[in-house]
Amino acid sequence: MKKFDTIIIGAGPAGLTAGIYLARAKKSVLIVDQGAAGGQMTLTHKIANYPGVEEVSGYQLANNMKKQAKSFGCKIYSSSKITKMDITGDEKFIEVDGEDNYSADSVILALGGEPRSLGLDSEKKFKGKGISYCATCDGDFFQDQDIVVIGGGNSALEEAVSLTEYASSVTIVHQFDNFQGYEHAIKEATEHPKIKIILEHEVEEFIGDEGLTSVRIKSNKDGSEKVLNVTGAFIFIGYIPRTDPFKGIINLNTRGEIITDSDLKTNVGGVFAAGDVIEKKVRQVTTAVSDGTVAALGVLGFLNSK
């Protein structure tokens, strides 16, 4: 079993930032993620509000962070599954991919979240057959096609604009009578010539045979229904924190988010948390980076006290 000072579970912006700070402080760091390094950031078509960087793709920013973390000595395992874990004792333990065992004195939970679904049976049927949760991943599959974007926050608005690079038309369907995004995102989406807006409607059913051919939506005002003839549907209605493995171990709120103190310590000694997985209001790349910094400094204090 190989021993590290810290194991970071999750390689999104929070996890990578924590790794950079800790490794630069000469601590041995292992970062493990079930997906690609960068987390949800890699799915973002364009990031234009990261301080000091005018514009960059989420994938490129994630790649830069990963390179920086590795340059300071972080060991990073991507696309790796944690098959066993015990973080309750003084010495933390994980098993990766059923064969490699690692221990550490401290852990940072930075697992992020996964896309929230509508929960429709027809959604499951067409997932990967017309339904997507990632514009960057799948946008080019819908070249010159009519598509729908479901949601009304910043992600839905920004990704709808990015999808106009491929699609003939994009229709945004949102359940409320106003958007929950920033003013600039709302303005860009509502003024785009390829984008149509349908407010106060919800999806009732996804329709098709082998692939998606239409979406049936229902008005929240009068109950009337209409069918949109589209071959693609992109769903951006938020994320669910990946905290199921920690229920009964780490204190969670009713939304499944990890409860921490101001130093991002959890109720378990030596265990910290950062990023979209914790209880907080704002979820941006910059706030995840901030969380990673705070958690790393908390871990440094904890390790030094030992």
Image (tube, rainbow, N blue to C red):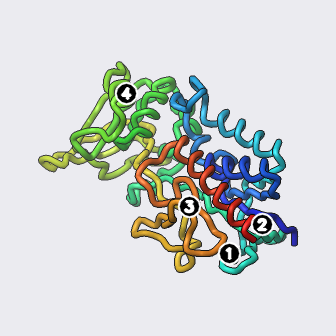
* Local crowd size for mark 2, using a 10 Å CA cut-off: few (<14), some (14–19), many (≥20): some
Q: Nearer the viewer, mark 4 or mark 2?
A: 4
Q: Mark 3 points at which residue?
A: 264
Residue 113, given in percent of the width and then of the height, sits at 53, 56
Q: Mark 2 points at which residue?
A: 97
Residue 85 visible? The answer is: yes
The circle drawn on residue 87 is 1
CB under 8 Å between callouts 2 and 3?
no
Residue at far left of view: 222
Residue at far front of view: 305
- Name the residue rendered at 33%, 30% in the picture: 183
Q: Nearer the viewer, mark 2 or mark 3?
A: 3
- Name the residue rendered at 69%, 56% in the picture: 33
The residue type indicated by label 4 comes to His
Label 4 vs label 1: CA separation? 43 Å
Label 2 vs label 3: CA separation? 28 Å
